[in-house]
Amino acid sequence: MADKRVTIYDVAEAAGVAPSTVSRAFSRPGRVSAATHTKVMATARELGYRLSAPASQERTQRHHRLGIEVPDLTNPYFAEVVSGMQEAAQEHGYLLLLLDSVEDEERERESLESALNVVDGLVLAGTRLSDATLNHLTKRIPVMVLNRRVAGLDSLTPDYEHGMSQAIAHLAEGGARSISYLCGPVNSWSDGERWRAARAAGRTHGIPVHRTGPYPPTAQGGEQAFEELSGDIPPAVICYNDLMAIGFLVSAIRAGVKVPQELAVVGHDDIPLSRFVGGGLSTLVTMKRAKGRAAIERLVRRVENPSAHRTPVEGSLPVRLVTRASSTVRPGAPMRGNR
């Protein structure tokens, strides 16, 4: 039947689905169930239906471009990660196509679909898509995931457990009797890992850790968190990111809360502004530019020599705590306790 130019309608009839379903299975696999996708792909192979170049596993035409997805380019954290990516991409002769999803899952999905025809691979720096959708995506194009682990995909994640353990130990030494974790987006994998690590570290140090939120991962989200907690401010908070921590910290200072004597604040990311707000924000640090470079280098190897990397590569990056005035109690100062 392959000699008769098998069409999408032939595949649909043989698979018992609508032609539009076959089209989605090839162009937007995240919009069909995994079972339907498998059935359509198997039927297409049996009939000899030839895939178009963008959807084919064998991508013979090189564009020398890589797509970079970020959830919020206005966050200085991602700007620094992308800077590292740009350096590595230029060294390897690739251009970057930047896709800012602005924390919108549907916009991210549409942007990635649009990019598939014009890039050789994708780095997802903060994807909110499901594991199933990402696994469908990697069947069509090489994918590298940052700040998240997905079975079957190359990934690079910070050591959240070690980082959170440092933060909890530091706050415990400063006298905090309880800690609140101000969480970020509900569909953020890294947020879930940070919360899990915070609970485990809290149990180790005998300190209750409470979760509040979710809040937008912005300074405005931190302001919102402070407003909601202002009637009963915890002695210490660890925030999803530095932007949220800065919003919370500034709101506390404006309200006359003594930092760090009455309130300790710790963030994540060490963005440049964190050094200058409130005498300095304590924060958990990863090597952002190095992370960006490593992501591009691994993706380029996958693109240029796919047969040499048949199994996914998972990597971990160290996390360290940088202590500043927002959490460090001077010797002899009153200890923080339950308010």
Image (spheres, rainbow, N blue to C red):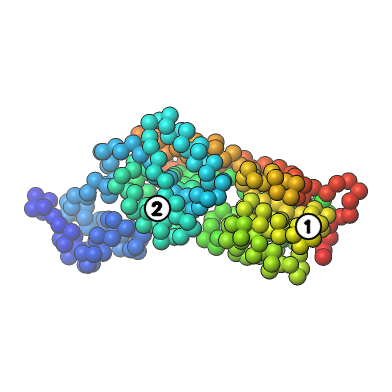
Mark 2 is on which residue type? Answer: Asn
**Residue extending farthest left:** 4
Q: Based on the displayed image, in which of its 4 quarters is residue 182 positioned?
A: bottom right
Q: Which residue is mark 1?
A: 263
N-term-proximal mark, 1 vs 2? 2
**Residue extending farthest bottom:** 231
- The x, y position of residue 319, in whole percent, is 64, 42
Which residue is found at the position 65% from the left and 60% from the top?
A: 222
Question: For the residue labelled by badge 2, is the local secondary structure a helix, a strand or a loop?
Answer: helix
Q: Is residue 214 left or right of residue 102?
A: right
Question: For the residue labelled by badge 1, is the local secondary structure a helix, a strand or a loop?
Answer: loop
- The x, y position of residue 286, in whole percent, is 61, 42
Q: Residues within 10 Å of mark 1 (few under 14, many from 20)?
A: many
Q: For the residues marked 1 and 2, what is the alpha-carbon distance in whole angstroms?
A: 43 Å
Q: Quadrant of the C terminus?
A: bottom right
- The x, y position of residue 107, in whole percent, is 41, 59
Q: Based on the displayed image, in which of its 4 quarters is residue 221 positioned?
A: bottom right
Which residue is found at the position 49% from the left and 58% from the top?
A: 103
Q: Which residue is mark 2?
A: 135
Q: Is residue 147 left or right of residue 333?
A: left
Q: Based on the displayed image, in which of its 4 quarters is residue 211 positioned?
A: bottom right
Q: Is residue 200 left or right of residue 96?
A: right
- The x, y position of residue 193, in whole percent, is 59, 54
Q: Residues within 10 Å of mark 2 (few under 14, many from 20)?
A: some
